Image (cartoon, helix red, strand yellow):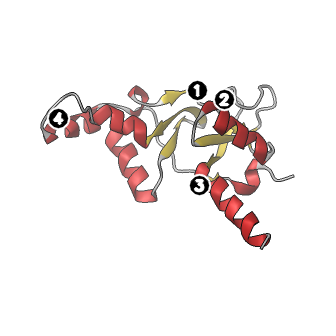
Amino acid sequence: MVTVADVMTSDPVTVMPDDSLRLARDRMAEGGFRRLPVVQSTRLVGIITDRDLRRATNSPFVLRERWYDDLILDQVKVWGAMTANPVTVEAGAALIAAAKLMRDHKICGLPVLEGTESEPIGQGMPAEGRLVGIITQTDMLGYLIQLLKAGT
């Protein structure tokens, strides 16, 4: 059985809830990421995506000057734009379980936790869970490509 741990990106880049949106945007840009887990101490508290950042800074209904976007990026904290208690998956879960969670919740990435036996997969993070990775649609597609290449 192929598990989430076999395909995930380990030790993902993270941000903290009190970090600025600019820091989150810069970390995403530097790493080529579209989402970052949000951690406080060692506990996952949310996830922030490039879409969350666009929503916070770009309104097609309001015309404003560039300085206003800069103010938002510098002053608004990650917790103000993140999704709290995101859907998660355990590192030892079957890869198909992660794929189904992503499909069913219409999301493109899942924080991966270890040590969460007290709570079912996909229900958010209990206090004893530890962030060990992230699995994204890009990781899944990379694995699919490997499978398809091996089959030819």
**Label placed on residue 31:** none
Residue that sits furthest to the bottom in the current view: 152
Q: Quadrant of the C terminus?
A: bottom right
Marks 1 and 4, how far apart in space? 29 Å
Instruction: Decide: few, some or many residues near mark 2? Use Cα within 10 Å; few <14, some 14-19, many ≥20.
Output: many
In screen coordinates, is 23 left or right of 73?
A: right
Q: Amino acid at mark 1?
A: Asn
Mark 4 and mark 3 residues within 8 Å of each other at the beta carbon: no
Crowding near pointer 4: few (<14 within 10 Å), some, many (20+)?
Answer: few
Of residue 138 and residue 39, the one placed in the foreground of this image is: 138
Instruction: Mark 4 or mark 3: name the one nearer the start of the chain.
Output: 4
Secondary structure beneath dot 1 equals loop
Q: Is residue 52 left or right of residue 129?
A: left
Residue 88 appearing in the image: no
What crowding class fits label 3: few (fewer than 14 Cα within 10 Å), some (14-19), or many (20 or more)?
A: few
Identity of the amino acid at label 4? Tyr
Q: Which residue is mark 1?
A: 85
Which one is in front, 126 or 152? Answer: 152
Cβ–Cβ below 8 Å for labels 1 and 2? yes
Furthest-left residue in this view: 65
Cα distance, mark 1 to mark 3?
22 Å
x and y, in percent, of residue 33 in the image: 48, 52
